């Protein structure tokens, strides 16, 4: 039982590092850490009976709250990226409008008209 308790402590430590990585915006490292945390938790809780789960309840509740923090931070990062992408899309449309207004027509638009001379 102490080995499983140590595994949950290790998963909590990994979860805190994962939260730090998400806060800094390092999603690749956070993904690696989340996979490690998942693997360790699966091993720790895999075949426990109800009585043993009750003895680990405090740590599991702490893990649940940490997971909620990680999820909240990931959602913040997702919404930030979504906002950045939509603003970049709008900026690209504006630049394309300036380009078209300056007389820079795309090649496809110039070549779609038939010349009467040929």
Image (spheres, rainbow, N blue to C red):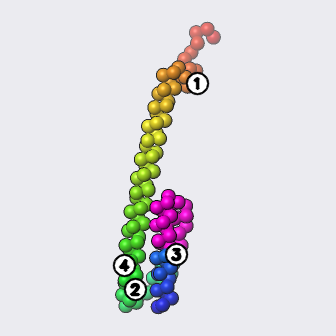
Residue 86: % across, % down: 43, 43
How much space separates mark 2 and mark 3, taking CA atoms? 18 Å
Residue at screen point 45% across, 46% down: 84
Magenta part mainly helix, strand or loop?
Answer: helix
What is the CA distance from the residue labelled 1 to the residue labelled 2? 67 Å
Q: Is residue 21 above or below residue 53?
A: above
Residue at image position (47%, 72%) is: 15
Magenta stretch contains residue 16: yes
Q: Earlier in the sequence, mark 4 or mark 1?
A: 4
Residue 90, position in %: x, y? 44, 37
- Which stretch is magenta? 14-36
The first of marks 2 and 4 along the sequence is: 2
Q: What is the x, y in percent for residue 22?
A: 48, 62
Outermost top residue: 117
The correct choice, above or below, for 117 with respect to 49 in the image is above
Q: Is residue 21 visible?
A: yes
* Residue neighbourhood size for the residue with mark 1, other residues' Cα within 10 Å, grouped as few (<14), some (14–19), many (≥20): few
- Name which of mark 4 and mark 3 comes first in the sequence: 3
Q: Mark 2 — residue?
A: 56
Residue topped by disc 4 = 61
Of circles 4 and 3, which is in front?
4
Q: Which class describes the residues within 10 Å of circle 4: few (<14), some (14-19), or many (20+)?
A: few
Q: Earlier in the sequence, mark 3 or mark 1?
A: 3
Dot placed on the residue nearer the N-terminal end, 1 or 2? 2
Which mark, by number, is residue 107? 1
Q: Dots 2 and 3: beta carbons under 8 Å?
A: no
Residue annotated with mark 3: 39
Q: Secondary structure at mark 1?
A: helix
Q: Quadrant of residue 109?
A: top right
Q: Are marks 4 and 3 in contact (CB under 8 Å)?
A: no
């Amino acid at each position: 039982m102490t080995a499983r308790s140590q595994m949950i402590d290790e998963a909590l430590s990994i979860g805190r590092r994962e939260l730090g990585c998400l806060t800094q915006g390092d999603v690749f490292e956070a993904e690696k850490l989340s996979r490690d945390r998942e693997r360790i938790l699966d091993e720790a809780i895999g075949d426990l009976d109800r009585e043993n789960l009750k003895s680990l309840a405090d740590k599991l509740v702490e893990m649940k709250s940490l997971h909620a923090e990680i999820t909240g931070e990931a959602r913040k990062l997702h919404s930030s990226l979504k906002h950045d992408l939509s603003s970049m899309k709008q900026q690209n449309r504006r630049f394309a409008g300036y380009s078209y207004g300056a007389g820079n027509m795309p090649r496809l638009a110039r070549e779609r008209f038939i010349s009467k001379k040929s």
